[in-house]
Image (cartoon, grey):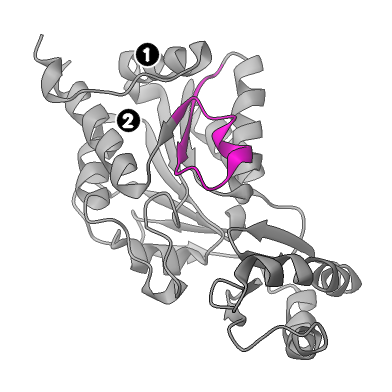
Amino acid sequence: MGNSAHPLPTPSTQAGREGLAALLARPSRAVVALDFDGTLADIVPDPERSRAHPGVVPALSALAPQVGAVAVITGRPAYTAVRHGGFAGVRGLDHLVVLGHYGAERWDAATGSAHAPAQDPGVEAVRGELPAVLAEAGADSGTWIEEKGRAVAVHTRRAADPQATFEALRVPLGSLAARHGLIVEPGRLVLELRPPGMDKGVALEEYVKETGAETVLYAGDDLGDLAAYAAVEKLRTRGTAGLLVCSGTEVPELAERADLLLSGPAAVAELLRSIAGRLTQS
């Protein structure tokens, strides 16, 4: 009945097919939650140059008014994701929420403001010791530190041997984090040192509870998204329908648990656009 204009990929699992069907049947009771880097934006060597794929904002602005809620859940500071995503002041995104620092920070499009807890003193201590730890570990000049406000990250993507450097830094950075009450969150050639207690799973569960959603779609691409996947799997046992989307195949731990495997941010944008189109027709 006209749906061919907006073809939707078929999830590979029964739970995923049920999740997509529930979203399409009761969109006003659905939450669409999305990671940023690697999901809405392509991974680039310099995170400051990361920007949402050109198809993302148009797709989100078409989809958001038709579903219960849309949230971006990221390890980045909320304002950084808003700026790099181009989300502020966009028609149709006036109720978008960005949960930054794994949910510790929250930006609401309705007010244009963000709320965040006080800085963890452990992050400041780690920031001061990190250069010496990297030097002692023999990290080459291609290894660099990203300041993330309430966290600090070490990237090895530009190192002479990115994967070997990543593996060599796991233990010393883990020890440094532990000394100051922090944890290490590994990602795609990045190790992030941050306070414990918040992750994307906690953030997603709390947001689903806040909205009263009956269905949740979550899309991610990296190890930090595993907690959100686990949250959706737990919500399913309580009667909430769920659809797990994986952007890219670089992280097998995520891809193997996904209901729907997409090639990257361009395909994620197309999925969002197709869902919006299907809802418009229904």
Label 2, label 1: how far apart the Cα atoms are: 14 Å
Mark 2 residue crowding within 10 angstroms, few (<14) / some (14–19) / many (20+)? many
Query: Dividing the image into 4 quarters, which one contains the C terminus?
Result: top left
Q: Nearer the viewer, residue 78 or 137?
A: 137
Mark 1 crowd level (few <14, some 14–19, many ≥20, 10 Å Cα): some
Q: Residue 34: name its quadrant.
A: top left
Across and down, in percent, residue 238 comes to: 64, 16
Q: Which residue is mark 2?
A: 67
The residue stretch that appears in magenta: 240-260
Place of residue 267 in the rendered image (x, y in percent of width and height, measured from the top left): 31, 41
Q: Nearer the viewer, residue 34 or 39?
A: 39
Secondary structure of residue under mark 2: loop
Q: Is residue 158 left or right of residue 130?
A: left
User: Which of 100 and 135 lies nearest the eye of the viewer?
Assistant: 135
- The residue under the point 43% across, 69% down is 80
- How many discs appear? 2
Q: Work out whether residue 95 can be spotted.
A: yes
For label 1, the residue is 21
The answer to whether 62 appears left or right of 204 in the picture is: left
Image location of residue 63, percent across then percent down: 25, 36
- Identify the element where label 1 is drawn: helix
**Residue 241 colored magenta?**
yes
Q: Is residue 280 above or below residue 109?
A: above
